[in-house]
Amino acid sequence: MRRVAVLGTGHSNYMFRSEKPSTELMSETAMEAIIDSGLMPGDIQAFLMGNAWGAFEEGQSTLQSYVANEIGCYNIPATRLEGACSSGTMAVREGFIWVASGFYDIVLVGGVERATALPTPLATRVFVTCADSLYEWPTGFVYPASFGMLAHLYCRTYNIPLSKLEGIMACVSVQSHEYALLNPKAQIHKKLTKEDVLNSPMVATPLRLHNCCPFTDGSAAIVLASEEFAKKLDKRPVYIAGVGQASSGRISSQSAYYPRIRSREVSSRQAYRMAGITPEDIDLCELHDCFSIASLIAAEGLGFFEYGTAGDAWEKGNTRIGGKIPINISGGLKAKGHPVGATGVGQVVEVTQQLRGELMEQGRQVEGARYGMTDTMGADGVVTNIILTTEK
Amino acid sequence: MEYRLPFRQYNKALRKNKLLGLKCNDCGKITCPPTMACSKCAGTNMEVCELSGNGLIVTLSTVYVAARGREAELPYTVALVELEEGPWIMGNLIDIDPRKAGMDLMGKKTALSFKVCPADEFSAGVAAARPAFCVMRE
Ligand SMILES: [Zn+2]
């Protein structure tokens, strides 16, 4: 296997109600990544794109092919990856494998979603099409309820009073909003207090509105290239050190592990093993905080904290810059936003910029970081992880 | 290879208040809702069995914001129940006030009933039954 580098990156503003259609959203950041790499569209050999629900949002399937044509990458293979909220990271991992294998030298990876084109009740219905439609959707199951059930089970399993967990979950949202204020591309630029979270309307017990990420429009893109090719360019390369991906069955089938997510443990261990490192080596992480309880479960599943203890880390500031492991310094899904198909690619862009030291001006640089990790979880347990590094 | 217990058969039985599962002839594990391979040993030597429908509430959440088409049911409680034969299954809790459904219900015994979910344009015309659990008073 060859080493694979991230060259240029592109990242749109994350927002509500984008006036641009997905083709334009995706094409703009794709071109941005190509230009940032010092390349031309004709240099791109293949395009991989994450997108979950284009057909529902805009009546547009097969976006990837139109985007390739829009940006002048004529007749290259363009492939869409769909794994709900993991779609974008799946595209990154796939691109890594294609370049690592030697089949291609330069691959463009992107992700896009325009979720706010849908009214909220329909968006909620469309998002829950990734749940088990035969055996679990009939209950009226929605994703906030999935994580609501996990929150109650988390309390019971680790013997944490619900009121204490509610306070911890509020801290998670407060931190994300604070960092998003420093991120010009974030969807929500609004300071949030613990009281704001605890007084927001109930969505699915015990999760309130401010325990939930928003619906988001946005796109992100990166160019991946072989190490040999990357060395010819003067851009400071960031390498993909490890990748992981795992799937799961319907929620009820995960009984033996809940509230742990087995597929996350499988996926992240693949990534650590490939990178030859352990969770202690990770200097920052962008993880899947679709709901604030999800942050705790993810941070523990990735091996950063003992099970049942991640809340202490958020409360004591150990997940901030300068803490044990800075988490979601972009603002996370909660406040940076969650444009489903783009989310994982956006996380890789964020970690790449952190590792290159490009966020000093924004006042949210994690200094001296050598290893950064991303984590996304789609549907009931489609988990993908990428570890990036500046190490040669 | 055909399913030993396809959705159609499972759904039909549940509409008669009968909960069907699969018993593995190799390892003895009960799988419910059904899958093609045994949830423990991945073998396919399984036979259809009827489950008691009795179980314990593992966890729950009361929904206040529904997906399109389900608003009239609000608020409602979704739960994971551990059946006495072992597997977990997702269902709704009935005979309770969803607004008051909290962690104190976790561990409570349940008995099986069912409700039918109306089909919408994304569900292939299938009106699927789902377990609706009555919480037993002690
Ligand atoms: Zn078996």
Image (cartoon, coloured by chain):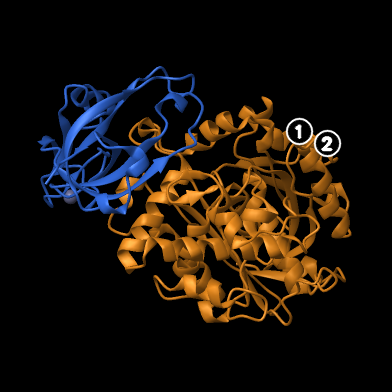
Chain colours: A orange, B blue
Residue A101 appears in the figure: yes
Task: Examine the rendered structure and indicate whether residue A272 appears above or below residue A113.
Answer: below
Task: Examine the rendered structure and indicate whether residue B82 appears above or below residue A173.
Answer: above
Task: Examine the rendered structure and indicate whether residue A51 appears above or below residue A221.
Answer: above
| CB within 8 Å, label 2 to label 1 | yes
Q: Residue at x 61, y 28 (%)?
A: A56
**Subunit of mark 1?**
A
Which SS class for mark 1?
A: helix
Residue corresponding to mark 1 = A66
Q: Residue at x 35, y 20 (%)?
A: B127
Which SS class for mark 2?
A: helix
Q: Is residue A20 left or right of residue B67?
A: right
- Tell me whether marks 2 and 1 sit on the same chain: yes
Look at the numbered disc 1 and say if its residue's Cβ is closer than 8 Å to ligand 1.
no
Residue A265 appears in the figure: no
Q: How many marks?
A: 2
Q: What amino acid type should be assigned to the residue bearing mark 1?
A: Tyr
Residue corresponding to mark 2 = A70
Q: Is residue B40 left or right of residue A240?
A: left
Q: What amino acid type should be assigned to the residue bearing mark 2?
A: Glu
**Subunit of mark 2?**
A
Specify the quadrant of the image occupied by residue A178: bottom right
Which is more toward the observer, A109 or A225?
A: A109
| Mark 1 burial class by Cα count in 10 Å: few <14, some 14-19, many 20+ | some
Q: CA–CA distance between discs 2 and 1?
A: 6 Å
Which is more toward the observer, A100 or A374?
A: A374
Give coordinates of residue A94: x percent, y percent: 60, 53
Q: Residue at x 67, y 76 (%)?
A: A321
